[in-house]
Amino acid sequence: MVEGLEIMTITHLLLDIEGTTCPVSFVSEVLFPYARQSLSSFLTEHRNDINLAHLLESAEQEWDADSSSDSINLRKRTKDAGLTPTNAIRMYFEHLIDIDRKSTALKDLQGRIWKNGYERGEITSQLFNETAESLRRWHSKKLSLSVYSSGSIQAQKLLYSHTEGGDLEHLFDHWFDTHTGSKKEVESYLRIAKEINSKSSNILFISDNGDECDAAKASGMQTLFSLRDGNPDQNPRGHRVIKSLNDVDAHL
């Protein structure tokens, strides 16, 4: 070995979900529509739930701090219409869904709605064909597996515990969502490295989003860009490319 040269050994895999381990279409065509269709009935059925009350309070605070013209105009329209607070916040959630805002309150609410759907057998997670086998293979190799997704941790665990390939939740050691920070900010990846007690250089982050890969690389992590048909971002920006999770092993 050349003196002073550090060999970077991968000990941790940090995985995105949408476009990386499951098709974008499952999220956009199954999960999101299910949450939207169930939004009104869920808010009504759980109106006396103290935990939901805290979540709605957080959403109200997000709305108050939302300076976009659309959100301000929506606030005015709901007040002028004399809507109840529950109906008003429902319209704000629908607005956030329409513009695909990475709202922490919305993600938490969607996770609660999806939990109902999974438990009722109305939703089964659709992963890429090789995902379950790949996760089990990496786990057997003693690699530590973690998830970092914009979806809530609850939603992440639900997705992996209700798959067509069985319950995969136990294969993961750590879970991270936007409570850790934006996936496009370097500081978020530094926090994750500290949380899992690893050097950044020993972590391999895999995502279908170039901005996220840029941030992870800037933090010192190694990166792979998931380039698949159907993924919105088709520009790897110089990051190493995989077209299947089976390609990951060549980079370990």
Image: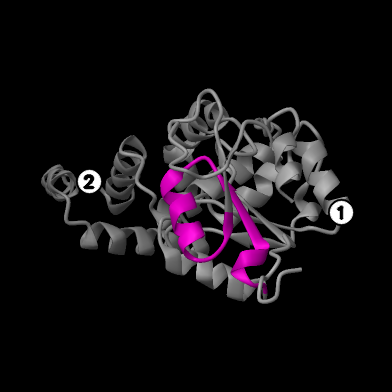
For residue 110, side relative to residue 105 (left or right): right
Q: Residue at x 10, y 45 (%)?
A: 80
Residue that carries the numbered disc 2 in the rendered image:
83
Give the image location of residue 29, x and y in percent: 51, 25
The residue carrying pointer 2 sits among few (fewer than 14), some (14 to 19) or many (20 or more) residues within 10 Å by Cα, namely few
Name the quadrant containing residue 97.
Answer: top left
For residue 76, side relative to residue 169 (left or right): left
Tell me which label, 1 or 2, sits earlier in the chain.
2
Give the image location of residue 18, x and y in percent: 55, 39
Query: Of residues 138 and 73, which is closer to you in this image?
Result: 138
User: Which part of the image, by quadrant, shows the N terminus?
Assistant: bottom right
Whether 100 is drawn above or below 76: the answer is above
Give the image location of residue 64, x and y in percent: 22, 61
Residue type beneath disc 2: Leu
Q: CA distance from mark 1 to mark 2?
A: 56 Å
Q: Residue at x 66, y 76 (%)?
A: 4
Whether 171 is drawn above or below 162: the answer is below
Residue type beneath disc 1: Lys
Q: Looking at this view, name the residue that lies furthest to the right.
A: 140
Query: Of residues 249 and 32, which is closer to you in this image?
Result: 249
Mark 2: which secondary structure?
loop
Give the image location of residue 119, x and y in percent: 70, 41
Residue that carries the numbered disc 1 in the rendered image:
141
Magenta-drawn stretch contains 115? no
Colouring convention used in this rendered image of the protein: one colour
The residue carrying pointer 1 sits among few (fewer than 14), some (14 to 19) or many (20 or more) residues within 10 Å by Cα, namely few
For residue 67, side relative to residue 243 (left or right): left
Q: Looking at this view, name the residue that lies furthest to the front.
A: 2
Mark 1: which secondary structure?
loop
Q: Magenta segment, which residues?
A: 198-222
